[in-house]
Amino acid sequence: MAEDTHQRRLRAAADEVRERLPSPGPDDWGLIHADLHRGNVVRTPAGEPAVIDFDDSGWGYYLLDVATVLSSMPRTCLDDRTAFLRFAAGFLDGYRSVRPLPPSAHAKLPRPRDLRRTRLARVAHRLV
């Protein structure tokens, strides 16, 4: 019985997220890492950042990777609250230097970190 309640709640939440996300299109949807948190970025011997752990990679909303990076950082900035804001600004500037933020970043969505925490974005993109 409890499982049915959890499934109904998850379905309702996934439906809400899916309704707010745009239809998958080339500007919002493509091949993503899907687990791009700080633990999956390492430094090479030359000091360059490198991404590892591609077992969750697949098709999804680009916003999921953006949200995952941003949601993985606040815990590392507890002693300096402005450190996260500097990181987020630098990350988003770097992202925009390669490609514009996906249009879904401007849609009326729950906060990206909430999507990441509940993994609803992954569920929703599988249901679309």
Image (cartoon, rainbow, N blue to C red):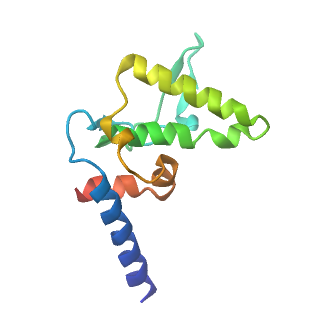
Query: Which quadrant would residue 7 be assigned to in this image?
Result: bottom left
Q: As displayed, is residue 98 above or below residue 79?
A: above
79 left or right, relative to 1: right
93 left or right, relative to 34: right
Q: Residue 17, percent across and down?
A: 35, 58
Q: Nearer the viewer, residue 39 or 67?
A: 67
Residue extending farthest to the bottom is 1
Q: What residue do we see at 71% from left, 32% from top?
A: 82
Q: Residue 23, percent across and down?
A: 20, 48
Q: What residue do we see at 58% from left, 37% from top?
A: 39
Tally of numbered discs: 0
48 left or right, relative to 20: right
Which quadrant holds the N terminus?
Answer: bottom left
18 left or right, relative to 53: left
Q: What residue do we see at 48% from left, 59% from top?
A: 118
Q: As displayed, is residue 84 above or below residue 35?
A: above
Q: Residue 122, percent across and down?
A: 36, 53
Query: Which quadrant would residue 65 be assigned to in this image?
Result: top left
Q: Residue 24, percent across and down?
A: 21, 44
Which quadrant holds the C terminus?
Answer: bottom left
